[in-house]
Image (cartoon, rainbow, N blue to C red):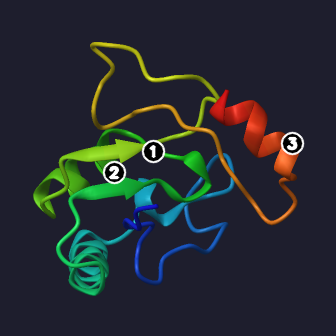
Amino acid sequence: IELHSHTYNRHTPGRCPGGQGSIMKCGDKEDLLADLKKSREQLNGTTVFCYPFFEYNDYAINILKEAGFTMAFAGGRQKIKVGSNKMTLPRYGVVSTSTLNDFKNIVN
């Protein structure tokens, strides 16, 4: 198991229009860069990110790149394919309500 960034302290809904309102889509650039820097420091310099609420846009992608991230996961509940965009990779979420059978189905 590896741990990577999901922001340091910017996982609050309702900050930006649309979806659940992830602040990654419209937040203050300097605030986001500072938060992402702190997150990377806490996680030994990780360059991998997972978008809060699976939400992203071009603004979020550009912020991540500026912050030094090289790969980011969104939603999609599908497997990654050769040639997938490294900044919008699909993923399966595992949450507190996920069962062992859910996890087995994801892995298989």
SS label for mark 1: loop
Q: Amino acid at mark 3?
A: Asn
Residue behind mark 1: 56
Residue at x 27% of width, y 33% of height:
86
Residue at x 26% of width, y 85% of height:
38
For residue 37, what is the image quadrant? bottom left
* Front-lying residue, 87 or 78: 78
Q: Amino acid at mark 2?
A: Ala
Return the mark for residue 33: none
Residue 41 in the image: state x and y as whole percent.
Answer: 21, 84
* Front-lying residue, 97 or 24: 97
* Distance of label 1 from label 2 (alpha carbons): 6 Å
For residue 6, what is the image quadrant? bottom left
Using residue 83 as the reference point, say whether residue 101 is left or right of it.
right
Above or below 76: residue 96: below
The mark nearer the N terminus, 1 or 3, is 1
For residue 106, what is the image quadrant? top right
Residue 83 in the image: state x and y as whole percent.
Answer: 27, 13
Residue 104 in the image: state x and y as whole percent.
Answer: 76, 38
SS label for mark 3: helix
Q: Are marks 1 and 2 in contact (CB under 8 Å)?
A: yes
* Distance of label 3 from label 2 (alpha carbons): 33 Å
The mark nearer the N terminus, 3 or 2, is 2
Label 3 environment density (alpha carbons within 10 Å; few <14, some 14–19, many ≥20):
few
Residue at x 33% of width, y 19% of height:
84
Q: Amino acid at mark 1?
A: Tyr
Above or below 28: residue 8: below
* Front-lying residue, 24 or 68: 68
Using residue 18 as the reference point, say whether residue 35 is left or right of it.
left
Residue behind mark 2: 60
Residue behind mark 3: 101
